[in-house]
Image (cartoon, grey):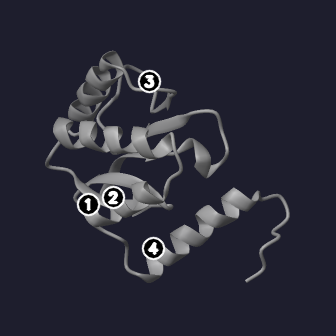
Amino acid sequence: MKTNVKGLTKEEIAAMKDTIKERKAGGTDGEGAILAKIAEMPEPDKSMASKLHAIIRAGAPELGMRTWYGMPAYTKGEDVVCFFQPASKFKVRYMTLGFSDKAKLDEGMMWPVTYALKMLTAAEETRIKALVKRAVSQ
């Protein structure tokens, strides 16, 4: 497979390869897949991802788990509701917590669906738990 695709970074190519592996394997489902992905992360992503995983599980324990484009993701049925991307994945300065269009976060005609995370204090933990609960509400 060609590894120097014009216009794509090394990290973007790696993410595409992760996606292809996931699809060939029929998806990598379950908490084991999420924990394995977190274990691969360098610090400080690993510590923050472990904490974020616990917050999401506490906020919506009914969500399924799988990797999605090589990232930990949480599902309702077949649909990804939320996911997090470590800062190291694309060499950016913060981790992100994202919500798909399946998340029930609508607020009028415009609302945020991705959040930058530099650290997790009690205030962020409370807000994330509330967002996750709202995302899966009917």
Residue 47, quarter of picture: top left
The total number of labels drawn is: 4
Report the Cα–Cα distance between label 1 and label 4: 15 Å
Checking the image for residue 111, the label placed there is 3
Between disc 2 and disc 1, the foreground one is 2
Between disc 2 and disc 3, the foreground one is 2
Q: Amino acid at mark 3?
A: Trp
User: Residue 128: where, in percent of width, then height?
Assistant: 31, 28
Assess whether mark 1 and mark 2 are in contact (beta carbons under 8 angstroms): yes
Q: Which residue is mark 2?
A: 35
- Quadrant where the C terminus is found in the figure: top left
- Quadrant where the N terminus is found in the figure: bottom right
> Dot 4 lies on which element?
helix
Q: Is residue 100 left or right of residue 41?
A: left
Assess whether mark 2 and mark 4 are in contact (beta carbons under 8 angstroms): no
Q: Amino acid at mark 1?
A: Glu
> Dot 3 lies on which element?
loop
> Dot 2 lies on which element?
helix
Report the Cα–Cα distance between label 2 and label 3: 30 Å
Between disc 1 and disc 4, the foreground one is 1
Q: Which residue is mark 4?
A: 22
Could you tell which of marks 1 and 4 lies nearer the N-terminus? 4
Q: Amino acid at mark 4?
A: Glu
Residue 16 higher or lower than 127, as above or below: below
Q: Is residue 125 visible?
A: yes
Between disc 4 and disc 2, the foreground one is 2
In the image, 7 versus 122, the foreground residue is 122
